[in-house]
Image: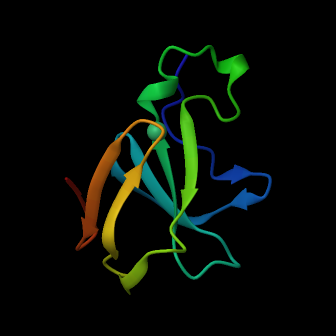
């Protein structure tokens, strides 16, 4: 069964300012990171039983290699690409723009 939102309090990944970009993409802030950390609902895990996953369908990924153009509204460059499932898009003006 899919969770409706990613865990904001996962040990070691306790995030503040968790923000929903889409139903499937959230970001938040780790205290020791300048750039945001993302959760995405990974389509590659859609059919994997939750007990065999780490965070249910959610996969966490940092953006330390990206340029934080603006924190509020969030703007990162270049685009984000998660190779686990091929999800690809830009975050500009606080909005997810599919690539
Ligand atoms: Zn994925």
Report the number of discs.
0
In the rendered image, the vertical position of residue 5 relative to residue 20, given as above or below: above
Q: Quadrant of residue 32?
A: bottom right
Residue 3 location in percent, x, y? 54, 29
User: 75 and 82: which one is in front?
Assistant: 82
Residue sticking out furthest to the bottom: 69
Give coordinates of residue 74: x percent, y percent: 34, 75
The residue lying toward the viewer, choosing from 15 and 92, is 92
Q: Is residue 38 above or below residue 24?
A: below
Q: Is 57 rendered above or below residue 23?
A: above
Residue 25 horizontal/vertical position (percent): 40, 48
Tell me which corner region of the image, top left, top right, bottom left or bottom right, holds residue 80.
Answer: bottom left
Quadrant of the snapshot with the N terminus: top right
* Residue in the image at 47% along x and 27% along y: 44
What coloring was used for the rendering? rainbow
Residue 70 visible in the current orientation: no
Q: Position of residue 95 (x, y in %)?
A: 24, 63
Taking the spot 41% from the left edge, 82% from the top edge, the residue there is: 68
With 83 as the anchor, is 14 left or right in this view?
right
Residue 52 visible, this angle: yes
- Of all residues, the one furthest to the front in this rendering is 83
For the point 50% across and 14% down, which residue is it? 47
């Amino acid at each position: 069964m899919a969770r409706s939102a990613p865990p904001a309090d996962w040990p070691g990944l306790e995030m503040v300012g968790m923000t929903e970009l889409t139903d499937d993409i959230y970001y938040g802030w780790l205290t020791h990171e300048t750039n945001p950390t993302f959760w995405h609902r990974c389509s590659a895990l859609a059919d994997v039983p939750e007990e065999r996953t780490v965070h249910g369908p959610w996969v966490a990924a940092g953006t330390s290699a990206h340029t934080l153009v603006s924190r509020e509204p969030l703007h990162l460059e270049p685009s984000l690409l998660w190779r686990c499932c091929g999800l690809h898009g830009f975050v500009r003006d606080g909005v997810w723009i599919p690539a």
